[in-house]
Image: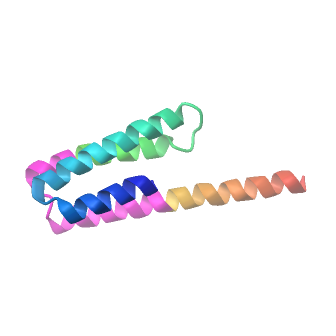
Amino acid sequence: MAINWAFTLQLWMVAEGSSLALSFVAVDTATALALYRMAERRWFPVPLVFLHGFLAVYHLYTAFTGPDSYWVVVALNRLFEAEILYVAGCGLFRILALRRGRAG
């Protein structure tokens, strides 16, 4: 996720308009494929696969409707926050599970 964030931040600084949305399609597609490979062994990345697959389609949609709309940015920001909360929650679950394993 950190690599995805770094790439999208750099693209946001360099690209504009439809090229920005199409470059986000490429980054989210690559992220979804990488997470899919990870999801073959564990359940943790499965929701992230679907999220980034949806984001790739959403960015493709915004490439044709205009990616500079306020609501496009709001929706993407809320999805990113949901992704961060999911990862933090999974990390907290893992910490608690490891503590229970040591205590038991």
Q: Position of residue 59 (x, y in %)?
A: 22, 49
Residue 18 against residue 26 in the figure, above or below: below
Identify the residue shown where x is 59% and y is 32%: 41
| Residue 47, position as x, y percentages in the image | 47, 45
Image quarter for residue 57? top left
Q: Residue 15, relative to residue 35: is it above or below? A: below
Magenta segment's dominant SS is helix
Query: Which residue: 14% across, 64% down?
Result: 68
Q: Nearer the viewer, residue 1 or 91?
A: 1
What color scheme is it? rainbow
Residue 84 screen position, x and y as percent: 47, 61
Q: Is residue 70 left or right of residue 48?
A: left
In the rendered view, does 65 fall on the left or right side of 77? left
Q: Which residues are magenta?
A: 59-84
Q: Specify the farthest residue to the top.
A: 40
Residue occupying image coordinates x 52% and y 37%: 38
Q: Residue at x 18, y 55 (%)?
A: 20
Could you tell whether 6 is left or right of 17 in the image? right
Residue 32 found in image quarter: top left
Name the foreground residue: 39 vs 6: 6
Residue 71 in the magenta stretch? The answer is: yes
Q: How far from the left and from the top, in percent, is residue 28? A: 32, 46
Q: Is residue 65 magenta?
A: yes
Q: How many marks?
A: 0
Residue 30 lies in what quarter of the image?
top left
